Image: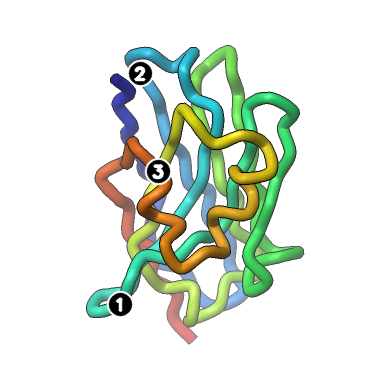
């Protein structure tokens, strides 16, 4: 089992930056893939970025490319999402997620799939991000 605790959300104006973090505990050696998803009330959860444990390969959805950066620190068992040039449409609850079966290619492609969230086993509790115009 893996436990994820995410945080770092807040309120910023458009153009601002935030740094989300996710701390993993438990059987962290089993994590093959880590990702960030986000969800707006009344809508489904959508992928944002992912990183593979095996080769540090990263993937981003088009809407955040060039603005968001995902990274992981295996020594501290932490996952980070740096969000720059935030836009009002980035407003959502952000969740970190992890899985112990997704290989490098599946890891970075799952975030773009409609059923991508179903492919992840472990989830954080969510942290809210609000971007004002």
Q: Is residue 60 left or right of residue 115?
A: right
Query: In this rendering, which labeled residue sits more in front, label 3 or label 2?
Result: 3
Q: Residue 128: which numbered mark, if any?
A: none
Classify 10 Å Cα crowding around label 1: few (below 14), some (14-19), many (20 and above).
Answer: few
**For mark 1, what is the residue?**
43
Residue at 67% across, 50% down: 69
Q: Is residue 24 left or right of residue 86?
A: left
Q: Earlier in the sequence, mark 1 or mark 3?
A: 1
Query: In this rendering, which labeled residue sits more in front, label 1 or label 3?
Result: 3
**For mark 2, what is the residue?**
25
The chosen color scheme is rainbow
**For mark 3, what is the residue?**
120
70, above or below 66, in the image? above
Q: Nearer the viewer, residue 20 or 62?
A: 62
| Label 1, label 3: how far apart the Cα atoms are | 18 Å
Instruction: Provide the secondary structure element on which disc 1 rests.
Output: loop
Q: Nearer the viewer, residue 62 or 73?
A: 62
Instruction: Provide the secondary structure element on which disc 2 rests.
Output: strand
Q: Measured from the top left, where is residue 51 in percent x and y?
A: 63, 40
| Label 1, label 2: how far apart the Cα atoms are | 29 Å
Q: Earlier in the sequence, mark 3 or mark 2?
A: 2
Tags 1 and 3 touching, CB below 8 Å: no
Tags 3 and 2 touching, CB below 8 Å: no
Classify 10 Å Cα crowding around label 3: few (below 14), some (14-19), many (20 and above).
Answer: many
Residue at 55% across, 27% down: 32
79, above or below 67, in the image? above
Q: Measured from the top left, where is residue 84 in percent x and y?
A: 64, 62
């Amino acid at each position: 089992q893996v436990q994820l605790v995410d945080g770092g959300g807040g309120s910023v104006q458009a153009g601002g930056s935030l740094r989300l973090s996710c701390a993993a505990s438990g059987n962290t050696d089993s994590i093959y893939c880590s990702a960030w998803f986000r969800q707006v009330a009344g809508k489904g959860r959508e992928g944002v970025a992912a990183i593979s444990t095996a080769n540090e390969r990263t993937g981003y959805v088009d809407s955040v490319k060039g603005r968001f950066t995902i990274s992981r620190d295996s020594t501290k068992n932490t996952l980070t999402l740096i969000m720059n040039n935030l836009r009002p449409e980035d407003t959502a609850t952000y969740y970190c997620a992890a899985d112990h079966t997704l290989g490098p290619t599946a890891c970075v492609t799952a975030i773009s799939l409609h059923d991508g969230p179903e492919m992840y086993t472990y989830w954080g509790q969510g942290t809210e991000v609000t971007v004002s115009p």
